[in-house]
Image: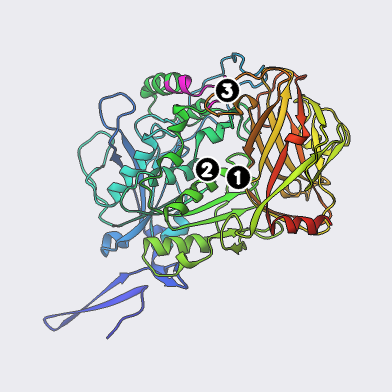
Amino acid sequence: MKITKLSALLILFVFGGSLTLLAQVKPIFENGEAQIVPELKDTANWIRHDLWVETEFDTDGDGKKDRMHVDVTRPKQTETEGLKLPVIYASSPYYAGTAGNAPIFWDVKHELGAAEKPRNQVEVVRRGKRPIISNDEIMTWVPRGYIVVHSSSPGTGLSQGSPTVGGDNESLAPKAVIEWLTGKDNGYTTPDGNEKVKAFWSTGKVGMTGTSYNGTLPLAAATTGVEGLEAIIPIAPNTSYYHYYRSNGLVRSPGGYLGEDIDVLYDFIHSGDESKRPYNNKTVRDTEMAQGMDRATGDYNDFWAGRDYLNDMGPMKAALLMSHGFNDWNVMPEHSYRIYEAARAKGIPSMIYYHQNGHGGPPPLAMMNRWFTRYLHGVENGVEKDPRAYIVREQDDRSKPTAYADFPNPQASDVSFFLKGGAPAAGSLGLEKSNSGVKETLVDNYSFSGSSLAQADYTEHRLIYLSPVLKESVHISGTAKITVKLASNKPAANLSVWLVSLPWTEGRNAKITDNIITRGWADPKNHADIRKEEPMVPGKFYEVSFDLQPDDQIIPAGQQIGLMIFSSDSEFTILPKPGTELTVDLDGTVLTLPVVGGKAAVEKAVK
C-alpha cells in the first residue's frame, strides 16, 4: 500500500501478534511551497537551546580559537521521533544590542582633505538572556518544516573574537556554524568547556537570510564555498564597505547617517566580552581601520579591497535570491546588482527582486518559500525556470511584483543625452549633440539641500538641464552613466549628480519615486583612478566619468527628466566652507540612460 499523506505518515509494526502505531510528522508541500504543518506550529512544543561553535580563527588575542554563540529552535519531533529537517540560519552583530543613538559620528563640516577632529568613542552595553539570541524567522519557518538557527557574529553578544566589519572572520564564523550543522564535531555546550554537542536533527541542508548587515553575512558565508549552504536570500546587503562609505574616490556617508564610517560601525556593534574590548579596539579599530580607511583622500586601497565580497566570489555556489529597494539610499542598489551580475555570470542559480521603496524589504513570502523549498528540501518546483527578475512597479503593492526576463530589462539600450545652456535657470537635455562652446558655473553651498536645488527656478548653486515634457512614459532599466567635463577654482571639490523627475511632488502622499530617479557622487581628483587622486589645477578641465545607481523606473507622461549637477550634497558628503566654483563644459558632458526601447522610445516620448 502506497502512503501519500506527508503530514502524518502512519507506520504499522507487528511484533508477536501485537500492533504498535507510530506517527512520524513530515513536511507538507503544495504548489512547490512548504506548508504549515499542524503538528509543528505549537510553540509550546518547540525545543530551544544554545551552544558555542568553535571557529578556525583567534581574533581577540587570547590564544584560543574563537567560539560563536548559537541558538536553535526546533520542533519536539526532532527529539522524540528522529525527525531531521533543513535549517534556516540567520547571523547578526545586532542581536545583543548596539550603541543606539550615541554621538559617535565624524564631524563632516571641514575642508576636503583637512585633518578631522577626533570623534567620540563609546562602549555598547550588552543585553539579552540565554538561551535565546533572537526570535527572527522562527514563526515563519519552523511551522513550515524547518529548524531555525541564529548566531551572534564575532565580538558581539556571547560570541568570542572581535568585530572586523567585513574582515575574513565575519565570513569564517558562519562557515564554522554551517560546518557544525552538516556534521562537523565543533559544537560545545559552553564557551570554554570540552563537552560536545551535535546537530543530529539537521539534514545538512542550510539556507541563510537577513536584512542589511544581517543580509551581508549570508553572502559572506557563501563566498567561502562551504558545503551545505545551499541557498541564500540577502535583503539589502552591504556587499562592499568601500561602496558603502565611499563613492568613486569621494568620502560619502550612507544616507541618513552623515559622518558614519567603518570605525563608527565597529563601535556601534562591539557588544562582546568587556575584558577583550581593549585588545580588539587597539588591534582592529585603532590600528587596522585607522591606517586603512583613509578619510583624507577616499581612495580605494587594499584595506577596502579586503572588505569587498565581489573579490571573494570564486568559491561561491549557493543559489542566490537577491532583494533590494531602488530607493535605498543607505545601502544603495548597486550593492545587490554587482553581486547578482557576478553570480549570474558564474552560472549560479540567481534571481533578483527589486521594489521601489527604501532600505530593507524582503521578497514576497511565496517567492522565498519556493526558493528554500527547492534548494533545501529538494522539491522540484521549477523555480530555476522562473523569470530571473521581479520588479515592483511604482504604484503596485510590494507583494505583487512584475516578472521580467532579467534585470536590466533585455529590451533596454543606452541612449545619450546632451546639454544646452540656461544657467542659473534651467538648460535643456536632449538627443542632439551641440558644439556651442558654452560653459556654465555653479557655486558650492551645502546650506541648500539637493531637493531644494532641484525645485529652485533660479539659483547659482546648481546646474540643471531638463528634457522636454514627456508625451509618453519612458522606462529606464539598468545603470545610468555620466561624463562631466569640469574645472574647479580650487584643488579639491565634491561632485554630486542627481537625476530627477519634475515637477517636484510635494505633500504627504508624495513618494520618493515621484522625484528621485537616481544619484551619484565622485571625487574629480580621482578622474583617472579611484586608487590614486591628484590635485586639480585650478581652471584646468578634467573629464570625470562614473556610474549612477542602478534603477528600474517608469517616468510618466507629463514629467520632465532633469539632470542636476552640484557640488557638496548636504545629505551625503563632506561639507566644506561654501564658495568653491565648478565650471562645466557642456560640449564635453554626456548622460547615458538605459531606456527600454532605446532611442526610438525617447524620440516618441518627446516628439
Separation (CA) of disc 1 from disc 3: 31 Å
Give the magenta range: 288-299
Q: Is residue 30 left or right of residue 495?
A: left
Give the residue type that dot 1 points to. His
**Residue 580, image x and y in percent?**
75, 20
Residue 212: numbered disc: 2
Query: Dot 1, how many residues are within 10 Å of its Cα: few (below 14), some (14-19), or many (20+)?
Result: many
Name which residue lies at 43% across and 43% down. Answer: 217
- Quadrant in which the N terminus appears: bottom left
Q: Is residue 12 above or below residue 412?
A: below
Q: CA distance from mark 2 to mark 3?
A: 30 Å
> Can residue 310 be seen from the camera position used here?
yes
Under tag 1, what secondary structure? loop
Q: Secondary structure at mark 3?
A: loop
Label 1 belongs to which residue?
359
Query: On the picture, is 111 further left or further right than 219?
Result: right
Residue 444 in picture, x, y percent from top left: 76, 24
Q: Residue 533: which disc?
A: 3
Q: Earlier in the sequence, mark 2 or mark 3?
A: 2
The quadrant in which residue 525 appears is top right
Q: How many marks?
A: 3
Residue type (three-letter) at the residue carrying disc 3: Glu
For the residues labelled 1 and 3, say whether their Cβ atoms are less than 8 Å apart: no
In which quadrant will I find the C terminus?
A: bottom right
Q: Nearer the viewer, mark 2 or mark 3?
A: 3
Q: Amino acid at mark 2?
A: Ser
Camera-side mark, 1 or 3: 3
Left or right: 598 in relation to 292: right
